[in-house]
Amino acid sequence: MHDQITRRVWALSCAVAVTCSYPSCAAATDLFGTQPFALDQPRINALLRRGAAEAPLTGTDVLGDEVFNIEAFYDTGASGVILSESTADVLGVNRARFPESAGTLVTFEDVGVAGSDTFNVSEPLHISLAPFHPLTDINNLSTQATVYDQSFGPIHTQVGPLNVVNPLLSDIDVFGMPTMRGKVVVMDPKPVDTLLDTMRTYVYEPDTPFDPGAKDIDPGIPVTNRTVRLSLASFNDFTTIQPAGAQGPMLAANPFIGHSPYPLDPAASDTPPGVTVSLNGHETTGSFLFDTGAAASLLSKKLAADLHLRYVQDTENTNDPRLETFDPLNPTAPGSVLVDQFEATIFGIGGSSTVAGFFLDSLLLRTVEGDTKSPDDPNHLRFVAAPVLVSDITLLNPTTQTPFTLDGVLGMNYLVASAFVSEDPFTIGPFGTGAFNWLVFDETRGELRLDLKAAAVPIPTAILMLLSALLSLLAGTRRRAAPG
């Protein structure tokens, strides 16, 4: 699966994220202030080799300097490793052919109902990773053996995409699930709260101990206080390789909060609980892709309909999409346009589209520490006034022509500092700080572990609700109001 949501970094604005995590709260831990778009997403440093013991591939940049490091997005929503054509060209990465050497260039496609993303396939490569941290010495070939200390391979990567929808995305490198298998990814989101810094990202072997003395440079795996169980789903069935019989890129399963949605096994037991969303007294639960490569979060049209929400007729897939509530028992009756909504441009398989978003009443993540059967257990995490875009990510099985649509995507805006962004006219604000000290994705155990920040001073629930209403009012000055 190729990442579906535009990667952007925004900064500046004003507001507060408030965490209610003390006994005065009567229900699940309530988190306020999440905005629609994350201010940063995890990245990683990487180098490539043709052989495990060979020197790194190097090239020359536009200034004539020797380069070998790749700064890539570290993306749980990507099933493979994607090198941009420019990166592959600078480092001299060969494209695979079939039959080898003199044959046809191998192509790989992610298939969706609106089209496909097409890539070349690389020669087999060995990949080594280094932490993403401003103090990491990533440009010294003499020390690369110790700095780039997590290795994978040989791996055939994707190269492209060949049909670029957005030129701004043409030079982006994405390292997905094949570079996380058997590892524990530790993310430090706290620096993003300053608006002037980036996330730190580290990759460790399982059971690497936490080192408090090195928590800002090489922390190991921190102790956390919330655990969200994950399942893994493979989407290989929605891809094609040409010519037939050629070796495609390495792909790995993607993590979901909830049951493995594909292939769905109705008899499966002990599946992780899904994401529960609510609006106007209506509630539904789905299995959401946990996507570190997504700046925003998505809700499928089906789950939106469960909440009695739909697109206004003839506004979907236009430059002015609008959402309305409706009566499912009388669907032909006019709906009521949401007053408080926003929109964004997203890029997916086959093209881009402008979609509408809104604020859920709540989005609930059930944790291992809480009682799964009790949504009000204080160990669960409930995001109040939770922003989502309404859009379907639909894949098409090229053999059976059977479509499959994700329930939703949990993006980084719920895990790091976030902001409200309006595209037309372009404005930014308000800003919400992140709720967590640490984010730990443990592929080996199928867990997303979170270290919730402690509330410094207990604040009465009434004050929290007032602050939430104030944030909504501030954001409303930058959102498109419903027509009168």
Image (cartoon, rainbow, N blue to C red):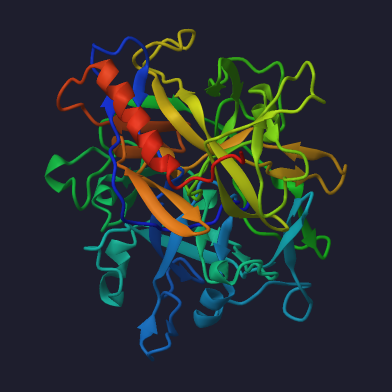
- Quadrant where the C terminus is found in the figure: top right
Q: Residue furthest right?
A: 400
Foreground of the two, 420 or 89: 420
Establish if 95 lies above or below 379.
below
Q: Residue at x 39, y 19 (%)?
A: 380
Q: Can residue 388 be seen from the camera position used here?
A: yes
Number of labels in the image equals 0
Q: What is the x, y in percent for residue 206?
A: 36, 38
In this rendered view, identify the residue nearer to me: 454 or 155. Answer: 454
User: Looking at the image, which residue sits at the far left?
Assistant: 213
Report which quarter residue 197 is drawn in.
bottom left
Residue 178: image location, x then y, percent: 53, 51
Q: Residue furthest front?
A: 484
Question: Residue 401, how many percent across, how many down?
Answer: 87, 44
Q: Dividing the picture into quarters, in which one does residue 232 lie? A: top right
**Residue 163 position by quadrant:** bottom right
Left or right: residue 447 compared with residue 470: right
Residue pictured at 54% horizontal, 69% vertical: 168
> Is 340 left or right of 214, judged from the image as shown?
right
Seen in the picture, residue 183 relative to 337 is either above or below; the reply is below
Residue 225: tell me if it is visible: no
Q: Is residue 437 left or right of residue 65?
A: left
**Residue 426 position (above or below residue 375):** below
**Residue at the image point whose x is 42% and y is 33% from the top:** 448
* Rendered location of residue 295, percent (x, y): 48, 49
